[in-house]
Every structure is written in structure tokens, then in C-alpha cells.
Image (cartoon, grey):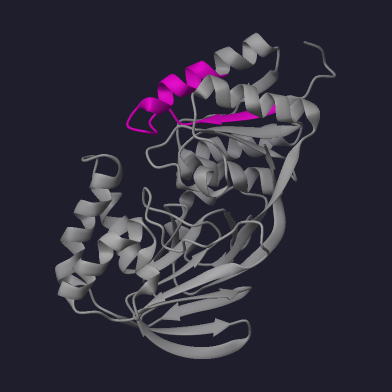
Amino acid sequence: MSADDPLVCLLTNPTSGAGRGRGAASAVTAELHRLGVRFFDATGSSASGSLRRAHVAAAGADAVVVVGGDGMVHLAAEVAAAHDLPLGVVPAGTGDDVARGLGLAVRDPGDATRAVVAALRAGRTRPVDVLAVRGGDPAGSPEHRGSPRSAGSDRYERVVLGVVSAGFDALVNERANGWSWPRGRARYVMAVARELPGRRSLDYSLVVDGVPEHRQALLVAVANTASFGGGMRIAPDADPGDGVLDLVVVAPLPAWELARVFPRVFSGTHVGHPAVEVRRVREVELAAEGDDLPVYGDGERLGTLPLRVGVRPGGLRVLA
């Protein structure tokens, strides 16, 4: 190990994957030591603490490496994009939708670490698109305070790798995130069952690639990758390398019909239902009646509507 070796800013989440993240973090740090990789562990006692430490560490680093699930990858991507550093991912969550959507193998943490280090030393990266999200309620996303991109502004710009969603699915996320049990997909499915009786459609005001439109919908999602919520393939054909976004709008449905269609989202066949519309876009401005609807990105709360989502082609380099 020498001062000329790459320096890694490391972020971990010991609580991810129903506790699996703790073992994964230990395995990764042990493997980094064994491989002679210099690293600084920027993990803090909270998301906001980790973010602040990571921004400081990233200023002198050559790469950001994250160990955890979608939420931790989301935070690490924010840091990597802000400092124009490549991102290495060691998946250790419950669903790992973002990692899978980026085409990364969900494997043993040691194997994943060796693959990331090999790519770093070879200078091998793959560009991926990101969602650039502006707007929302700053109070709704305290984990992003302290980001250089958002400091001193009430119009945050966030980086999202997977899916931004508002509507029924965001309300489900809101409910599911308040529970510690059950874990994984079961928690999301149970939250769907609880939200279903009170579901309601909303009047959305959209500006899609500069063209205004008004839609009544159960949910609106903007996708860079195919899935969220532990394997729900909301936009099955989304490609994080095509330079465009998949806009998904689900029209109002009776409760019995929504209950019948919902299971099809896990295979992606829901897009064949006449109430589901998917189209390729580059930018969406999104608002809804009341403008207090929660918005989620990569499974993390971004705040509330209104907001604007655009694509930044090749906005992040992934070690692969």
C-alpha cells in the first residue's frame, strides 16, 4: 500500500438487509485491508451525518464505494455525482432494486468487493444516466442537508438512480417506512393492503417535455431503472443507459381491479393493462392538487410535490 494507490470513500449501512448489512460491512472492510486498498470509512451515526462526512472525505478520494441497500446507494450516488467520482456498489439490502437495475450482480460481499477493486485499479467504469430532481420540501428530506449542491437553497437538486414516484405507491412507501416488521417485500405488500381501501386518484398537472397536460391518476412514476419496492417492475423496459426516462401513469381503477392488477407488477406484465400508460420522456414537471403529496426516490423520501425530474445522460460512472 502506498500513497499513490487509489483512496476510497467508504459508506456502509449496518442496518440494511434486515441486519445483513453489518456482516457485509465487516466483510468488505476486511477484504479492502487484504487487497491493500486505502479507504476512509465515512459512515456516521445517521444518514445526514454520513452525508456530511462523505462529502468531506470525497474531496480527496478517487472513488466512492457503498455497502448497503437502495437508500444507501442513493446517498452514495449523491456524493459521487457531486464530486465527479466513480461509484462502486456492494449490494447488501433487502431488494437491491437499484443495483439490479444498473446491471450489477448481487453476490457475496467479498466477491463484489474484489470486482469493484479490480475495476477501480483498471480504471474501468460504465456511464449510467441519473434522474436530476429539483423541488420538493426541504424539511421532508433532512438527510440531504449539507450537500454542496443544495446548500443555501430551498430548491434542492437530488440525484436519483432508480425510480421517482408520487401517488398511491408513495403513500404505501410512507406507511411501510413507519414499520420495523415485517421485512423486505412482505412489508410493502402489507402496506399496499392497508392503503388499498382508502386509495384515491388525484388531479395531476404535468409538463412533459415542455407540453402541459392534466391527468387524473392513482400514481405517477418516473423511472430510470425497471423496479422498486423489492422487485416491483413498474417500468420493465427502463434502461439507465438510453438517455431517456420512462414515465408511468396509472389511471383510476376500482379497488377490486387494482387488487387484481397489482400482483402483475412483479413480472412487469401490468403495463399491458389499459389503465397503465408508459412513454419515453426527457423531463417532467409534476404537481398535484394540494401539493402535499409525498414523493419518493430510490425508496427514500424526497419531500412533497411540486418538483421537476429530468435525465442527465451518463451523469454517473459506475465501477463495473
Q: Which residues are magenta?
A: 8-28
Q: Position of residue 271 (x, y in %)?
A: 40, 70
Counting labels gives: 0
Quarter placement of the C terminus: top right
Q: Is residue 320 left or right of residue 186?
A: right
- Front-lying residue, 225 or 132: 225
Quarter where residue 204 is shown: bottom left
Asked if residue 154 can be seen in this view, the reply is no
Name the residue located 46 percent from the left edge and 85 percent from the top edge.
Answer: 205
Q: Is residue 78 visible?
A: yes
Q: Is 20 part of what is drawn in magenta? A: yes
Above-or-below relation of 191 to 93: below
Quadrant containing the N terminus is: top right
Give above or below for 260 relative to 93.
below
Task: Place residue 66 in its image quadrant.
Answer: top right
Is 68 positioned to the left or the right of 311 in the image? left
* Side of 260 where 80 appears, left or right: right
> With respect to residue 56, does 1 lie above or below?
above
Q: Residue at x 37, y 52 (%)?
A: 229
